[in-house]
Image (cartoon, rainbow, N blue to C red):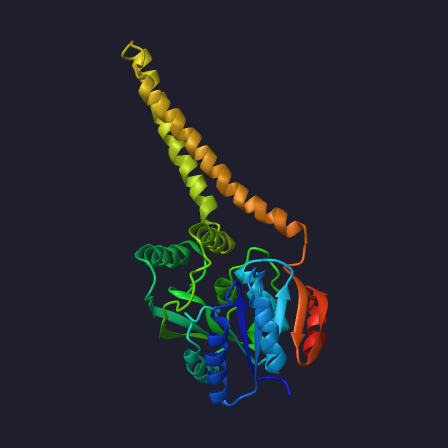
Amino acid sequence: MDPLISVIIPLYNEEAILPLLYQRLTDVLTAVGEPYEILLVNDGSTDGTPVLSYELANRDPHITAINLSRNFGHQIAITAGLDYSRGEAVITMDGDLQDPPEVIPELMRRWRESYEVVYAIRINRPGETWFKKATAHVFYRVLRWFSQMDIPIDTGDFRLMSRKVVAQLKTLRERSRFLRGLSRWVGFKQIGVPYERAPRCVGSTKFSFFRMFHFALDGVISFSLFPLRISVYCGLAVSILCFGCLLYALYARFILHRTVEGWTSLMVILLGVGGVILINLGILGEYVGRIYEETKRRPLYIVDTLFSLEHPLPFVKSAPAPWELRQFTS
C-alpha cells in the first residue's frame, strides 16, 4: 500500500541525533494513524550517519535510506527526497530536531482543509546567537523586498506539500535551488502555521557564515533581477556625478580662468568609479556563472545506494528522469 505521508529528512553528519529523531518522528507518525514513509537522505556524511540510516531501514519497513555519492548540498538532498517520495502529503524538515515533529499533526490538519502547501513560521528561535537571528531577520525581509514574489518571512524548509505541488517541483531542475521560493513560485493554495523552533539538542550547526551567505545569494539571484538593476542605478549615479565634475572643470577653466586643483578629489572619483565597475562585474558574473552551470546539463545529484525492506539489495541509480520517476512511484 502506498503511503499517505512522506517525510523527507536531509542528513549531514547527524549520527548523534538520528536515534532520537527516529524515535520522536515515528511516535508522532504512528499517532497520526496513516500509512507513512520516512526518507533519510544522506548528503555525503563523513561519520556513521549512512550506516545508522541503513540499520534503521533494515529493521523498519517505513524507512528508506538514500545515500548520495557525495555532498551535493542541503537543497539538492531535499530534491532527491522529493524525487523518490510517494506520499500524497510530503513533509520536508531538517534532521537536527530544531523542526519539532510534534508540529506535523497541525500541518496535516491544514492540508486536510484543502491547502496544497502548509509552511511552518518560526515565531521564536531559542538557542541561536544574536548574530544568526539578526542576519536571518534581515535576509528574509531583503529577499521579500528584492524578489518579485511574496515569499513568506521567517520560514524555512519545514513544510508540507501536496502531491500536486511536488509533481510540479519535480519538473523544475535548476541547479541553484531555493526550495522555499520554488514552492511559493508554483502557486496553489498556501497557508502558514506558527511554531516555536527548538534549540539544537546535540552537536552544532553545519551551516557556516559563508554557506549561509551563499544560500542567501542563491535565494536573491534565483528570484530577482533587482541586483542587475542596482548596478544600472549605480552606473547612472556615478555617470551623473562625473558629468557634473566635468562641467565644473570646464566652467573653472574657461569662465574663472583657473585650473581645477585637487589630486585627492580626482583619486576619490577614480577609485569610486573603479569600485562600482568591479561590483557591477561581480553581480553580472553571478548571473553568468549560473547560466554556465545550467548549460552543462549535469544531473542535480547521483545516488550511490538506496536501501529499504522493499528494495532489500542496495542498488546504484543516477538522478532519475521524469519518466523514470513515474515508473518508480507507480
Q: Residue furthest top?
A: 257
Q: Which quadrant of the structure image shows residue 167? A: bottom right
Count all numbered tags in the image, as a single digit.
0
Eyeballing the image, is 179 above or below 289?
A: below
Q: Is any atom of residue 329 visible in this view?
A: yes
Eyeballing the image, is 122 above or below 239?
A: below
Residue sitting nearer the eye, 46 or 235: 46
Q: Quadrant of the N terminus?
A: bottom right
Residue sitting nearer the eye, 40 or 264: 40
> For the point 45% across and 40% down, which residue is it?
232
Q: Which quadrant of the structure image shows residue 324? A: bottom right
> For the point 48% across and 80% down, which residue is it?
23
> For the point 50% across and 72% down, which residue is it?
18
- Tell me where residue 218 appears, x and y as whole percent: 50, 53
- Tell me where residue 254 appears, x and y as whole percent: 32, 12
Q: Is any atom of residue 248 visible in this view?
A: no
Q: Which quadrant of the structure image shows residue 53? A: bottom right
Q: Is residue 113 left or right of residue 57?
A: left
Eyeballing the image, is 204 above or below 52?
A: above
Q: Residue furthest left?
A: 256
- Tell me where residue 295 appears, x and y as whole percent: 66, 50
Q: Is residue 322 left or right of residue 224?
A: right
- Tell me where residue 179 appears, x and y as whole percent: 51, 63
Q: Quadrant of the C terminus?
A: bottom right
Residue sitting nearer the eye, 218 or 60: 60
Q: Is residue 330 left or right of residue 199?
A: right
